[in-house]
Amino acid sequence: MSKSKIIEVAFKKCETCNDYNILFCKTCQTEVEGKNRCPECNRFVKTTPCPDCYGCGFEEEYRLGDYCSFYVSQYSIDEYKKFVGFTGYKSKLYKAKIVEIVKEDTVKIRVKGKEMFVSTADL
C-alpha cells in the first residue's frame, strides 16, 4: 500500500513576482532585467528581492484550522455568491475556517456552516 503525502501548509502566491526569482531596483522598486540595469533609473543599481514576499514566492501561509477572510462582491464568480447567499451590489467579508488542505494552492473552507473548495488566491 502506498501512503499519500499529507500536505500541511497551503500558500498564497505573491501577486507581485508570481513565485519567480525577480529582482527589483533598491531605489525605485521597479523590476530589474538582465545585468542589474534598471529600466526606470537607466543605470546599474543594487537589487533587492520582491518587496511583498521578500523572495519567498508566497505572501501568506494557511494551515489546517486557521481562520481567514473570504471576500465576496458583485464581481465574484456566481458559484461563490451562491455559496454564501450573497445578494446586493456591494461587498462582504466572511470569516472562514480551513477544514482541509487539498493541494499547495487549494483548500477546503467552512463558511456559514457549509464547506467548499477554493483556491488560496481567492482568500
Image: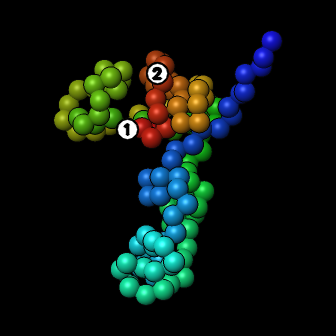
**Label at residue 71:** 1
Identity of the residue furthest to the bottom in this view: 43
Q: Residue at x 72, y 22 (%)?
A: 4
- Image quadrant assignment for residue 83: top left
Up-down relation of residue 56 to residue 118 (above or below): below
Mark 2, Cα crowd under 10 Å, few <14 / some 14-19 / many 20+, is some
Q: Residue at x 49, y 38 (%)?
A: 120
| Label 2 element class | strand
Q: Is residue 15 left or right of residue 23?
A: left
Can residue 11 be seen here?
Answer: yes
Identity of the residue furthest to the front in this view: 34
Front residue of this view, candidates 50 and 114: 50
Up-down relation of residue 99 to residue 22 (above or below): above
Q: Residue at x 45, y 71 (%)?
A: 33
At label 2, which amino acid type do we have?
Answer: Met
Depth check, mark 1 against mark 2: the one in front is 2
Identity of the residue furthest to the right in this view: 1
At label 1, which amino acid type do we have?
Answer: Tyr
| Residue identifier under label 2 | 116
Q: Is residue 91 left or right of residue 48?
A: left
The CA distance from mark 1 to mark 2 is 14 Å
**Label at residue 88:** none
Residue 30 appears at what percent x and percent y?
A: 41, 72
| Label 1 element class | strand
Q: Is residue 120 left or right of residue 64?
A: left
Residue 60 appears at what percent x and percent y?
A: 55, 48
- Image quadrant assignment for residue 72: top left
Can residue 26 be seen here?
Answer: no
Front residue of this view, candidates 107 and 23: 23
